[in-house]
Image (cartoon, rainbow, N blue to C red):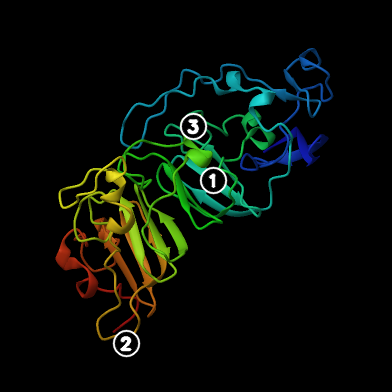
Amino acid sequence: MATVQASACFHPRSCLTAGATVLAISIAIGGCPPSPPATICRDDSDCPAGRCDPNGHYCYLDDVGRDGAIADVGADGDALASDGGLDAAFDATATDAACHRFGPVVQIAAAASATCVRNAIGEVKCWGGNAYGELGLGDTLKRGDSTVEMGCHLPTVDLGGHQATAIAAGFNHFCALLEDGSLRCWGKNRYGQLGLGDTMSRGAEPQHMGNALPAVPLGIDAGIAQIAAGGDHTCVLFDNRVIKCWGLNIHGQLGLGDTYNRGDGIYDGGCDAGGPDAAVDCEMGTRLSAARILADAGSGADAGATRILAGANHSCAVLVDGHIKCWGYNGNGLLGLGDTFSRADQSNELEEHLPNVQMEES
């Protein structure tokens, strides 16, 4: 913990400077960046330790070339590009032109590599690792390991003018449910977890985001009640209590009774869709089956779920009768079924054959 000279922004063109005691975790989302000795400037000559923002007339730090030679390593062991010296690329014109207040934050979602928050008016900001474009900022530069990258200088994710009503985080991808009912996902897409019929990551190039980021085709008229992102798979719960999942399925975590990935554009026969959208049409939309998760036969309860949760390689749902069912990878018994056998990677392991998690004596 240290006392620093920190800036707080209360108006788009004014920053008030005051001493503040801050913790490392208090990253001051939406606040103005810490100031070098000169806090009022006309040009860069007034800022010996940084540059002058011509709009706000305050100095901001410029640690040129910081960690430009350090490379990231992905969760799957792949060597990833370095951040290229993020601060060297920063410029007042490359960030928010005006310092505006972002808060209050109403939701936070933490991935393996990054963190995103959503505010009360549906804006999203993300920071951390960005090797796959998971920050949704049109590049692969890390954010958050220098004070000049946060606050005013951390852009909001371009959602094409839409407001996010919910966000979810996987290992290296994020999804946002928008006010128009559509679902948009960005970041790593090696297994089709973005649901776009290919394995191309989104968010690493400027043309990936905004209106250029496609909605996930889900092929159902019901609204989305909840979204959940697992390690490399994604699930949604619809208002009609149906669950659909896509992405990595090596352990049956999609709840479909097999181990075929969905959403990656790689499919095995039985599909005659043609044209440029064939890769999506054969796996997503109406072709994407609902997870086969039902209440126990004879329970008298309607089939379906009221809540979903996606883990690294497994998924769980709370059913309308209050029971819990989990499926997918079962190492260490994380499905709660008294053994270590994965479930839903075979067709005879679902519906009435998938036991409830026992929470009390029967």
Q: Nearer the viewer, residue 209 or 297?
A: 209
Residue 317 higher or lower than 25, as above or below = below
Quarter assignment of residue 296:
bottom left
- Residue drawn at 56 percent across, 40 percent down: 158
- Does residue 135 appear in this view? no
- Residue drawn at 53 percent across, 34 percent down: 137
Quarter assignment of residue 40:
top right
Q: Earlier in the sequence, mark 1 or mark 2?
A: 1
Using the numbered discs, state the Cα–Cα distance from disc 2 to disc 3 in whole angstroms. 51 Å
Residue to which mark 2 is pinned:
300
Using the numbered discs, state the Cα–Cα distance from disc 1 to disc 3 in whole angstroms. 20 Å
- Residue drawn at 19 percent across, 57 percent down: 258
Q: Please state the horizontal and vertical placement of residue 47, each as a whole percent of the image.
A: 77, 17
Say which of marks 1 and 3 sits in front.
Answer: 3
**Mark 2 residue element:** loop
Q: Amino acid at mark 1?
A: Cys
Q: Dividing the image into 4 quarters, which one contains the N terminus?
A: top right
Residue 150 higher or lower than 94, as above or below = below
- Does residue 81 appear in this view? yes
Say which of marks 2 and 3 sits in front.
Answer: 3
Q: Could you classify mark 3 by the number of other residues whose Cα lies within 10 Å: few (under 14), some (14-19), or many (20 or more)?
A: few
Q: Please state the horizontal and vertical placement of residue 93, each as a whole percent of the image.
A: 67, 25
Residue to which mark 3 is pinned:
207
Q: Is residue 279 left or right of residue 92?
A: left
Q: Is residue 145 left or right of residue 292?
A: right
**Mark 1 residue element:** strand
Residue to which mark 1 is pinned:
116
Q: Could you classify mark 1 by the number of other residues whose Cα lies within 10 Å: few (under 14), some (14-19), or many (20 or more)?
A: many
Q: Amino acid at mark 2?
A: Gly
Q: Amino acid at mark 3?
A: Gln
Q: Residue furthest front?
A: 275
